[in-house]
Amino acid sequence: MSKEIVCLKNVYVYFNKLPVLENINLSIKENDFLAIIGPNGGGKTTLLKVILGLIKPDKGEVKIFGKNPKEGRKLIGYLPQYTIFDPGFPASVFDVVVMGRYKGMFKGYSKKDKEEALDALKTMGMLEFKDRQIGKLSGGQLQRVFIARAIARKPKLLLLDEPTASIDPEMQKSFYELLSKLKEKMAICLVTHDIGVVSVYVEEIACLNRRLFYHGPKEAGLKKLEDVYQCPIELIAHGVPHRVLRKHK
């Protein structure tokens, strides 16, 4: 039986006294491939930040690899929805990826660090670009490099927030096929609006709109999406990103 690596029990988060997450109970196990899906403003990114220990819940318990989030996140790789960088900065692809092995000022990078960076680039199909200046990559290539940086530290859990937002549709298939291979080495949890990805690649889904409407196998979860979005599944599938302001009639 797979070991539980993330456990949230009765978690609540409030911003300005308004609930963002309500009574969340979530479990992620080793080698899970989980998608968190739900409308904009439903708390998906907040949930990832709770797991990372960047947001402390107002109520409830969070255990990451059996520890508190700040200790457990050493075993997590994270790709945020928006990665801000200067495309003109004179850094190579390798320079960016080896930063994933950063241990603090004046410590430098060991031979092992450099080997792991090269291995991560190879895993993401970007080794041939290792000497290219980072600003000269396409959106899809850039995302692969940022994921390579996240996995260079050999995490046990990879968190991805809308990872294909800047990737052309033609590149998305190969991108998710790469994630499917990564699943053999680590658990993957991604936030996405893409119903197609959920139906083809992931194994479990969490349907979130402040409350967790469903968490389990994708087949049953897809049927729950109408409850989450409060509109017909056809509208969800064709509305990316989808924002619900009021209940559809």
Image (cartoon, rainbow, N blue to C red):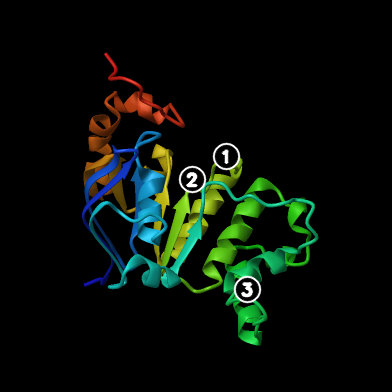
The residue carrying mark 2 is 162
| Image coords of residue 219 (percent x, y) | 25, 44
| Image coords of residue 52 (percent x, y) | 40, 60
Q: Earlier in the sequence, mark 2 or mark 3?
A: 3
Q: Amino acid at mark 3?
A: Ala
Secondary structure beneath disc 1?
helix
Q: CA distance from mark 2 to mark 3?
A: 23 Å
| Side (left or right) of 208 relative to 191 | left
Image height of 2 relative to 146, above or below: below
The residue carrying mark 3 is 117
Residue 226 figure quarter: top left
Q: Residue at x 49, y 60 (%)?
A: 78
The residue carrying mark 1 is 169
| Image coords of residue 207 (percent x, y) | 28, 42
Instruction: Say if residue 214 shows up in the picture.
Output: yes
Between residue 50 and residue 166, name the one nearer to us. 50
User: Could you classify mark 1 by the number of other residues whose Cα lies within 10 Å: few (under 14), some (14-19), or many (20 or more)?
Assistant: few
Q: Nearer the viewer, mark 2 or mark 1?
A: 2
User: Could you classify mark 2 by the number of other residues whose Cα lies within 10 Å: few (under 14), some (14-19), or many (20 or more)?
Assistant: some
Q: Earlier in the sequence, mark 1 or mark 3?
A: 3
Secondary structure beneath disc 3?
helix
Image height of 32 relative to 140, above or below: below
| Image coords of residue 39 (percent x, y) | 36, 34
Residue farthest to the front, as pictured: 16
Instruction: Say if residue 185 shows up in the picture.
Output: no
Residue 27 figure quarter: bottom left
Secondary structure beneath disc 2?
loop
